[in-house]
């Protein structure tokens, strides 16, 4: 029975993949020739982006999301002798040939925060090191536009802070939590109409947990996951618009919380892709 269920699920996925192949987003790469890329922020003099050819990688692990990543080399211009620093901001922006922003939300790959902090606090002036920036979106048209039009990059919001402004409230979603607490949760019930940033981040964190559950069920051949597809896609697009709207109103603590949620999503997607 389980084998039949899995085969039926596989057929459904193949059908979706066939439809997506008729113009849907696909895995892709784009070579970018970068020179004199800007670094912006109150710590912009700490690093610079090394000139060179960089590869923007687009991966489509599911029909709902697309993941962008790029590995860039930074040169340490001004070491900071302070072991109590934390990273704030550090968003990589993708630009078209006219300098128009296509996306400014790529963040450091999970676990590379500590690598970057060690680089700027213990490295020597002139030292160079590679770092990976990434972001997941739920907008196939935007994804295709980025992979087609990307031509340049810069670093925004480059700054540090010296206190831990928030404590993490999120935790890994276990199989027990998936089964016992959220199996009957309706994605449509999430309310993101509020302009209160804390409420939006809380709802977004809950949505990410549901998305991770969806991926687990899909990977296990659970056909019920297919019924969640439309709601998850719609909600992802709504969150993308809402977070754009309130981004300028976020405090440092809220921005760091947002980055933490994003890293949780990206880590789950990478784990799913590797499996």
Image: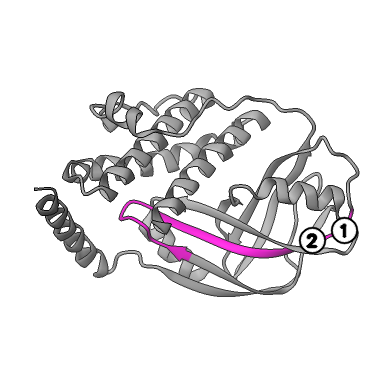
Task: Decide whether residue 221 is among the magenta residues.
Answer: no
Which residue corresponds to the image point at 39% horizontal and 27% vertical from the top-left?
Answer: 193
Which residue corresponds to the image point at 33% horizontal and 55% vertical from the top-left?
Answer: 62
Does the image show residue 95? yes
Which residue corresponds to the image point at 69% horizontal and 26% vertical from the top-left?
Answer: 165
- In what element is the residue under mark 1? loop
At which x and y percent is residue 237? 37, 44
Mark carried by residue 48: 2
At which x and y percent is residue 229? 25, 45
At which x and y percent is residue 18? 20, 67
Does the image show residue 244? no
The local crowd at label 2, few if under 14, some if 14 to 19, many if 20 or more residues have their Cα within 10 Å, is many
Mark carried by residue 138: none
Task: Decide whether residue 71 is among the magenta residues.
Answer: yes
Where does the magenta region start and end?
58-78
**Which numbered disc flags the more N-terminal residue, 2 or 1?**
2
At which x and y percent is residue 24? 30, 64
Q: Quadrant of residue 39?
A: bottom right
Q: How far, Cα to Cα, is label 2 from label 1?
A: 7 Å
Q: Is residue 68 left or right of residue 20?
A: right
Do the residues under discs 2 and 1 have CB atoms within 8 angstroms? Answer: yes
Which residue corresponds to the image point at 62% horizontal and 35% vertical from the top-left?
Answer: 256
């Amino acid at each position: 029975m389980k084998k039949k269920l899995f085969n039926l699920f596989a057929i459904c996925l193949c059908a979706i993949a066939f439809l997506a192949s008729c113009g849907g987003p696909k895995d892709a790469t784009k070579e970018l020739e970068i020179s004199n890329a800007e670094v912006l922020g109150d710590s912009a003099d700490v690093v610079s982006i090394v000139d060179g050819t960089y590869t923007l990688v687009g991966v489509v692990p599911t029909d709902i999301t697309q993941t962008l990543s790029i590995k860039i080399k930074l040169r340490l211009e001004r070491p900071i002798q302070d072991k109590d620093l934390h990273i704030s901001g550090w968003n990589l922006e993708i630009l078209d040939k006219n300098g128009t922003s296509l996306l400014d939300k790529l963040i450091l790959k999970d676990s590379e925060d500590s690598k970057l902090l060690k680089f700027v606090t213990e490295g020597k002036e002139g030292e160079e090191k590679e770092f990976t920036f990434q972001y997941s979106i739920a907008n196939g048209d935007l994804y295709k536009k980025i992979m087609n039009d990307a031509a340049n990059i810069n670093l925004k919001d480059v700054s540090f802070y010296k206190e831990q402004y928030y404590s993490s409230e999120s935790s890994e979603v276990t199989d027990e939590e998936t089964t016992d607490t959220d199996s009957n949760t309706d994605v449509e019930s999430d309310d993101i109409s509020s302009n209160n940033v804390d409420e939006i981040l809380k709802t977004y964190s809950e949505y990410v947990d549901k998305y991770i559950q969806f991926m687990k069920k899909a990977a296990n051949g659970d056909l019920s996951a297919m019924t969640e597809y439309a709601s998850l896609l719609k909600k992802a697009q709504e969150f993308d618009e809402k977070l754009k709207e309130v981004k300028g109103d976020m405090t440092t603590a809220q921005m760091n919380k947002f980055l933490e949620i994003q890293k949780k999503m990206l880590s789950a997607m990478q784990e799913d892709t590797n499996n």
